[in-house]
């Protein structure tokens, strides 16, 4: 098509040269181009896949018509492609046509419009967003659908996660090429320039976070157990995907990309839990009551000899801001996430990936070794590796008492494992 319109190919067949786009005599465009490129007609002759950008929110003619590129051209002059790319004298790789800040290249490209200091009335990412320029999470693989990038922005299986890993910036909807969204259409997990739809089944999230997929068959899949529950962006589980009710990639309220308002009267990890498990929340059927296992306490005796007894544990511990700690030799704190709730605990034993669609476990009455706990085939007593009570400060000393009954971890061992 390019050559049919008057462009000239190089000596070798299909090689692009200057005269492929430019025509010194008889040019049609004001930059001696073979066709007028004010609407990016010349660009999309070759870059046909990218023309799906036209009439989406990334078409600056609709969203920011007065925006100028580094050549001080408005979109009406440069065309929609020219708002971000320029064929000559570009600011950096990808023929970038906007000023870039310091930092990794891929992120700065996006922040040139979506940054808090961009000066544009666009979607900003906030202070807490999904990390970028990182390797994919360990012990998992990422599909070719979500590409990784090198520092030079070339695709590589050995690259790092960048904004472009999850976002296809030229296409509004991954499942409908004709869906252009439009200026006033609010996005959700099914579009928003995502490479994979994340609505309904959180496929985008689970493509990397495969170890979390069993959430789909648990009561923590709010699309089944609390379909009307919304995150802080006003999206239900069906709109955001089950992951998106509790986590958002941008503009999160706190640690773990939290997607709900965090109360301020408890330690951070407990706050995450009681955001739903309160008398007015979606988890109001499962409250912890006024007397519950102590949290936010230090285990000073872990991996140390005390009175001839060595205490160790396979359960994770967390620091004061809710980050999981890799070495339990230090004085870390036990939190609600230690015994249940996060990571691998977010499930009933997996009866099959698609079982959540029929969801036989909805509001099922659980037993001690089933209720979203980390240890399934091993009792919590065995996990702690000790037949003694948990040492925790309390008004009646050690072992700690709850509602007048000594709680000993080995008492839980009488329940048969599930599955």
Image (cartoon, grey):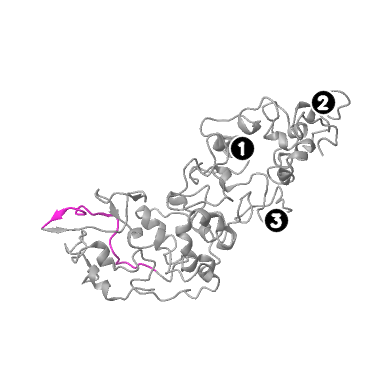
Q: Nearer the viewer, mark 2 or mark 1?
A: 2
Task: Please tell me in which quadrant of the rendered image residue 338 appears.
Answer: bottom left
Report the magenta stretch's main SS. loop
Distance from disc 2 to disc 3, alpha carbons, whole Å, reads 36 Å
Residue 205 x, y percent position in the rendering? 52, 55
Residue 342 makes an appearance in the image: no
Q: What element carries label 1?
A: helix
User: Magenta span covers which residues?
Assistant: 287-307
Point out residue 6 in the picture as x, y percentages from the top left corner.
85, 32
Task: Label 2, secondary structure: give it.
Answer: loop
Question: Which quadrant of the figure has residue 236?
Answer: bottom right
Q: Distance between the residues labelled 2 and 1?
A: 30 Å
Contact, mark 2 vs mark 3 (Cβ under 8 Å): no
Tell me if 215 is positioned left or right of 401 in this view.
right
Residue projecting furthest to the top: 24
Q: Is residue 71 above or below residue 295?
A: above
The quadrant of the rendering that contains the N terminus is top right
Mark 1 touches mark 3? (CB < 8 Å): no
In this rendered view, identify the residue nearer to me: 404 or 387.
387
The answer to whether any part of residue 283 appears in the image is: yes
Of 254 and 178, the residue lying toward us: 178
Residue assigned mark 3: 176
| Picture residue at 46% right of the left edge, 44% below the top | 135
Q: Is residue 288 magenta?
A: yes
Q: Position of residue 244 (x, y in %)?
A: 53, 57
What residue is shown with label 1?
113
Q: Please, what secondary structure does the residue beneath circle 3 have?
A: loop
- Name above or below for residue 266 compared with residue 72: below
Counting other residues with Cα less than 10 Å from the Cα at mark 3, is it few (<14), some (14-19), or many (20 or more)? few
**Which label sits on residue 32?**
2
């Amino acid at each position: 098509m390019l050559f049919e319109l008057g462009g000239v190919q190089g000596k070798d067949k299909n090689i692009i040269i200057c005269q492929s786009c430019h025509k010194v005599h008889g040019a049609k465009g004001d930059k001696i181009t073979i066709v007028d490129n004010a609407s990016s007609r010349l660009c999309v002759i070759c870059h046909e896949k990218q023309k799906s950008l036209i009439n989406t929110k990334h078409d600056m003619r609709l969203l920011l018509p007065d925006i100028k590129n580094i050549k001080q051209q408005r979109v009406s002059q440069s065309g929609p492609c020219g708002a971000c790319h320029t064929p000559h004298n570009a600011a950096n790789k990808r023929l970038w046509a906007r000023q870039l800040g310091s930092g990794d290249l891929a992120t700065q490209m996006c922040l040139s419009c979506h940054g808090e200091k961009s000066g544009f009335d666009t979607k900003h990412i906030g202070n807490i967003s999904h990390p970028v320029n990182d390797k994919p999470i360990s012990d998992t693989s990422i599909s070719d659908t979500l590409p990784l990038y090198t520092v030079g922005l070339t695709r590589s299986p050995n690259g790092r996660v960048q904004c472009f890993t999850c976002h296809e910036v030229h296409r509004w909807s991954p499942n409908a090429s004709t869906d252009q969204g439009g200026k006033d259409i609010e996005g959700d997990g099914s579009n928003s320039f995502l490479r994979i739809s994340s609505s309904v089944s959180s496929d985008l999230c689970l493509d990397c976070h495969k170890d979390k997929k069993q959430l789909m068959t648990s009561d923590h899949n709010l699309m089944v157990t609390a379909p009307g529950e919304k995150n802080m962006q006003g999206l239900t589980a069906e709109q955001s995907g089950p992951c998106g009710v509790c986590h958002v990639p941008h503009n999160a309220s706190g640690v773990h990309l939290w997607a709900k308002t965090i109360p301020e009267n408890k330690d951070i990890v407990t706050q995450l839990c009681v955001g739903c498990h309160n008398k007015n929340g979606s988890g109001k059927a499962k409250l912890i009551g006024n007397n519950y296992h102590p949290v936010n306490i230090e285990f000073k005796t872990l991996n140390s000899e005390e009175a001839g007894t060595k205490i160790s544990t396979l359960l994770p511990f967390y620091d004061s801001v809710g980050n999981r700690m890799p070495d339990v030799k230090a004085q870390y704190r036990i939190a609600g996430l230690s015994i249940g709730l996060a990571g691998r605990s977010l499930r009933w034993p997996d009866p099959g990936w698609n079982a959540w669609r029929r969801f036989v476990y909805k509001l099922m009455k659980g037993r001690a070794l089933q209720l979203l706990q980390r240890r399934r085939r091993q009792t919590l007593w065995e996990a702690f590796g000790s037949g003694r009570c948990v040492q925790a400060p309390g008004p009646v000393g050690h072992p700690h008492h709850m509602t007048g009954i000594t709680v000993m971890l080995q008492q839980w061992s009488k329940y048969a494992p599930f599955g």
